[in-house]
């Protein structure tokens, strides 16, 4: 396994980000997609050599002769390169969860998913992501042991985790919570906002509220952003001005701001970018003086990125209606 311990932490982080971004750009430049047919511009073996050369070039830029412990990418990378090239229309059966999208878009999302798998394997073999052994540490602290690995083709024994009586009572109790159907995060901008009280009648879709339906209020809309930016442009500010007016006019109206980013750059950077985008939108809505608990916030980084970066760089604003 490659070791980064010989480099300063900031230089190692820069080298890792440069490697992952460079490999991403290289893979995208070599990929050829015509209708529902995928191919590489050269053979998987040649591409593996290019990826290995890219590692040497990036380390040279950092003043290092090599990446200690790295002896080239494994045959698993070679197989993943081949898997991408073998994608065809039959693989769309695995994307049944996106059946409401056009055929071409579903196929590109499938290709993107395979590229993500390939990039993750490259990152693992470069030592950027490592298995932490956290599960084993938890087991050791709890005083119970993990079953042995039965090997390929075997079945691992069931794990029996001892629980306290208090924990068992919590797990077996009836769930009486009532939250909006849209995803909710505990990531708040500024000081933590108070947790909203459970509504008496539960949240409703804005389409079910005649007053909002008459105004053609959408259930959700997107606030777009420029690449790498969290700055609200003029169109975004105009959109959110209308939202502020609605929030003041209808006290029962609530919103969830969900940040997204495209897949360019490091995963950590994109997660942070999606967060600050969601914070910017939420803060703009709150300028009208509505209660903070009426505007929730969530973010996903690049986890929900598709095949069109312009569509990924956004904050999704979803409305819901709560009766007093």
Image (tube, rainbow, N blue to C red):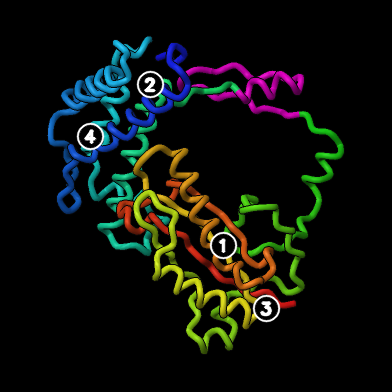
Marking on residue 125 = 2
Stretch of the chain drawn in magenta:
134-161
- Give percent across and percent down for residue 21: 32, 35
Labelled disc at residue 251: 3
* Kind of element beneath mark 1: helix
- Secondary-structure class at tag 4: helix
Regarding mark 2 in the picture, which secondary structure is present there?
helix
Going from N to C along the chain, the mark reached first, 2 or 4, is 4
30 or 7: nearer the viewer? 7
Give how far apart the Cα atoms at labels 3 and 2 are: 53 Å
Residue at mark 1: 282
Q: Earlier along the polypeptide chain: callout 3 or callout 2?
A: 2
Left or right side of 227 for 241: right
Give the distance between the C-alpha atoms of the residues marked 2 and 4, in whole angstroms. 17 Å
Q: Position of residue 104 (x, y in %)?
A: 25, 57
Choose mark 3 or mark 2, whichever is in front: 3
Counting residues from the start of the chain, the first of labels 1 and 3 encountered is 3
């Amino acid at each position: 396994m490659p070791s980064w311990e010989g480099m300063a932490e900031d230089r190692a982080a820069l080298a890792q980000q440069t490697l992952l971004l460079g490999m991403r750009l290289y893979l995208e430049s070599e990929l050829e997609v015509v209708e529902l047919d995928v191919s590489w511009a050269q053979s998987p073996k040649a591409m593996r050599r290019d990826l290995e050369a890219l590692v040497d070039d990036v380390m040279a830029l950092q003043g290092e002769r090599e990446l200690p412990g790295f002896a080239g990418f494994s045959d698993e990378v070679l197989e993943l390169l081949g898997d991408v090239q073998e994608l065809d229309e039959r693989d769309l059966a695995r994307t049944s969860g996106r059946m409401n999208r056009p055929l071409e878009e579903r196929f590109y999302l499938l290709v993107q998913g395979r590229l993500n798998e390939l990039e993750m394997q490259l990152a693992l073999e470069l030592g950027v992501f490592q298995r932490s052994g956290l599960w084993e540490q938890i087991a050791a602290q709890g005083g119970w042991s993990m079953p042995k690995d039965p090997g390929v083709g075997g079945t691992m024994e069931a794990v029996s985790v001892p629980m306290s009586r208090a924990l068992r009572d919590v797990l077996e109790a009836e769930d009486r919570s009532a939250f909006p159907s849209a995803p909710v995060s505990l990531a708040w901008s500024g000081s933590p906002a108070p947790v909203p009280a459970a509504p008496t009648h539960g949240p409703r879709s804005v389409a079910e509220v005649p007053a909002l339906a008459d105004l053609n209020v959408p259930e959700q809309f997107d606030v777009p952003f420029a690449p790498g930016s969290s700055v609200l442009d003029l169109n975004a500010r105009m959109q959110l001005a209308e939202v502020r007016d609605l929030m003041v006019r209808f006290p029962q109206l609530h919103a969830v701001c969900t940040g997204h980013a495209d897949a360019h750059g490091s995963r950590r950077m994109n997660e942070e970018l999606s967060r600050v985008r969601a914070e910017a939108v939420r803060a703009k809505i709150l300028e009208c003086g509505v209660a903070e608990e009426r505007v929730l916030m969530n973010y996903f980084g690049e986890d929900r990125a598709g095949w069109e970066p312009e569509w990924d760089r956004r904050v999704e604003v979803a409305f819901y209606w709560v009766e007093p």
